[in-house]
Image (tube, coloured by chain):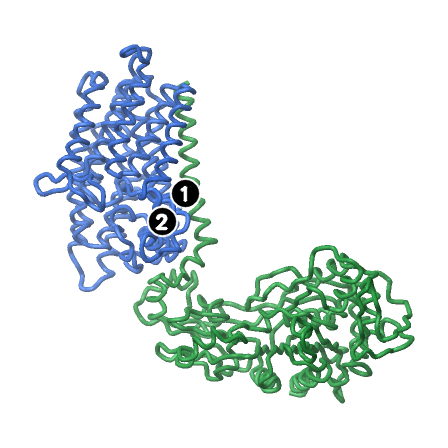
Chain colours: A green, B blue
Amino acid sequence: MTNRRIVNILIVISLLFLTLIGYLTYFELSLKEKVSQNPFNKRQWAYEDDTVRGSIIDKNGIVLAKSDDKKRIYPFSNLYSHIIGYNSMTYGKSMLEAKYNKLLLGQDDFSTVFYLSSAKRAGYDLTLTIDHNLQKLASDRLGKRNGAVIALDPKTGAILAMVSKPDFNPNADTLAEKWLELTDNEKSPLLPRATGGLYAPGSVFKIITSAAAIEKGLDGETYEDTGKVTIKGKTFENYKTKAFGKINMERGFEVSSNFVFCTLGTQIRSEGLLEISERFGFNKTFDCDIDITKSRFPQKQADDAMSAALAIGQGETLATPMQMAMVTCAIANNGIMMKPYIVQKATNQNGFAVYEGKAQQLYKPISGEVASRIKSMMVNTVKKGTGSGASLRSYQVGGKTGTAENELTLKSEDKEHTWFVAFAPADDPQIAVAVMMEYSGGSGGENCAPIARDIIQKYLYK
Amino acid sequence: MLSFKRPVNMLVLINILSFGLLFFYREPLDYNVLYVGGAITVLTVLTYSIIYFAHLGDEYLFIIVSMLVTLGVVMLCRLNYMLGIKQVGWYLIAICAFYITFALYRYTKNLEGLKWIYFGAGVALFLITLIFGKSVGGARNWLVIMGRTFQPSELIKIIFVLFLSCYFSGDRNKKIFNINERYIIAAAAYVYIGFLVIQREWGISLLFFITYIILTYIFDFDWLLLLINGLFIMIGGTIGALTLYHIKVRISTWLNPWSDIANKGYQITQSLFAIAAGGFFGRGIGLGSPQLIPEVHSDFIFSAICEEMGIFGGIAIILLYFIFVYRGIKIALLLPDGYDKCVATGITVIFAIQTFIIIGGVIKLIPLTGITLPFVSYGGSSLVTCFMALGILQAISSKKQVNA
């Protein structure tokens, strides 16, 4: 009996020791990253002092960030503030500088094991998927207006350009000088709007509503569009209350008829819209080079009036410009949504790639047939609908406009967010673009479509 | 014929490699390192040979322990040569103490009859510490003897085991003043724990409590007694956690050390930074920065080992303790019921739980309580008393061999 109990104790002790080993392993695999990046970790400071931080270059080799002795230099100042972020002893790190800190410092298991000399270490250089010329054009065209422009390769998910305004100058001197102003500013210049700003998507959401309508076989009806429709006491008007008369869903999409889509909303209902939105990535997060805020579609069941509002991208739906760019990519890419990525590769001093960004499928929200139906609707929108501002002479462009009401439009007219999403060429999409201007007033077709056109043109006529 | 299948030869090889590395990595070359390495290797091989050729019982116990000591000395030399040299000196004294304890335990008769003498000796040591002791780091738990500091609680660990074993191997139905003796023994155990609490030795008092519970479970199994003890410690622990500032601080820095890194959470966060820096394979001996951890040479030596020898190095240490505990338990299992069996179990359990408490503490698995890592941490009283305990275990294993 005694021996029996001694063995029991041996088992308990073994379990205790196993717990130690298990926790150490867990610490190493899961907690280590966060712990070692803590700003109080003196080892990290020492390591950074001993290392020449890697450069960041665009896909054509143009240097976007480099290190000179201990200073981090951003030659294009504001242009990459919401992609590369900043790297400061005082304020820490943000965006790619934070996410890829380890690679920029050349810290990986390989170098830890084999680094035995006392020479100054060299970090790894990052090559981005960004096209500097496109980035510059996008920023220039957005100008001083607040908003975001994103260009993606729909077949791979590579981010070609991504601009958020307002932006800031991440160079150390200016950052220190302007820091208080930046953090206090009510326009939040430190917020990367393209990936972190949440906006009502407005009529751009009709892409998703159409997909649901086609899947449910609700696309064959004909409507008598009177310019406005009243559902459960709530009235929805077309843009400028324009009546389109006898139209089908396709035509309703091209002219962005709220009459048609509100009616569809009451048929698909909020549950149906929720289901398809989640297939497109709403209410979901995924791991990405740049943190993308979760876009939201309300999960509670809604009545007919609310379902109608949701169908036209109003109500409580909020999306990041990146989310809508990804939706556009899925339409362009036969229903397959690729995972956005921005780091093409990381190379060591000898040019050997220690990390490579790969094209990965993220979701497959809809079938190829549904995607191609919507694709042709979007092409017609540019050809003979609200998106005519984006048409090009030698390429077929597909697009969708959006004008979204928000908390400010309740008080004053002319404060809508305006949107435009597009892809081209329609038969073999090379580029997808999303343009969003916050509180700009006007319409997506007037404000945003020309910017999207210019970017597509620059990219395709390179 | 030299073969690396023999553990002692592997140990020599590891000594040559690690001290060679320590010697070469820093300029100017310091020949002290070679003397330290040579001394520890000679001491180890010599003692091992004596144990092996004179048939002094289980030969593996000493091998495992000297591996631990070697790792500790390598780490100490890397942190500070002086500490390494001193530790080797303590190792020499500890081996002497090992032989003396071995001989005393092996050849003294009627050790199990000294129950109240053990108890008295323990209490006396506590009282002396309380009256003449010196405060180090907020706890009055050091004695100064001829200019050298000494921590009596380390020695009391052994006395505690010997005392409990007297009871467990004796007549258990005895009554003193009409009270069942097991409750008297329980009260005596809490006297020890009480002294430790007064001295703010949280780690060792926890160690004493767990050891007492485990030994009671094994040798005097009684649900009522275990239940009473469980309740007692739960109530006591809750009151302590709610009222005693020191315990509150320990619990809050365990739950969230990151909120106060500059002050209360400093030690544990520095320890975690060190472990995180090491990764699986470590940064290499001499290439990390373990000196950033306060008390790195004693309580936090495990973190330093993890930083420079990696998590695999740390796991190897845990496994060494595991084999040691396994050998100890094996010795106890093969003995007939009686005093030696209790002592062997008690000493093994003390080593196992002490290891768990301190390693669990520095990796933030459990709240941190200051206690040394047996055989590895720097410190004379810790090393010498650990080897005394080893001497007892060795003596018991040699008796078994004779009897078998």
Give the CA distance from mark 1 to mark 2: 13 Å
**B118 vs B284: above or below:** above
Subunit bearing disc 1: A
> Foreground: B54 or A285?
A285
**Res B395 → quadrant:** top left
Tell me if I can see residue A433 in this picture. Answer: no
Disc 2, SS: helix
Disc 1, SS: helix
**B48 vs B72: above or below:** above
Tell me if I can see residue A32 in this picture. Answer: yes
**A20 vs A424: above or below:** above
Q: Is residue A382 left or right of residue A451?
A: right
Where residue B349 appears, as percent x and y from the top left, is 33, 31
- Which disc number belongs to residue B293? none
**Res B199 → quadrant:** top left
Q: Which amino acid type corresponds to the residue marked 1 in the rendered image?
A: Leu
Quadrant for the N terminus of chain A in the image: top left
Subunit bearing disc 2: B
Task: List the single residue furthest toward the bottom.
Answer: A393
Answer few, some or many: residues within 10 Å of disc 1's Cα (few below 14, many 20 plus, some between 14 and 19): many
- Which disc number belongs to residue B313? 2
- The residue under label 1 is A20
At x 22% / y 62%, what residue is drawn? B26
Q: Which amino acid type corresponds to the residue marked 2 in the rendered image?
A: Gly
Q: Nearer the viewer, mark 1 or mark 2?
A: 1
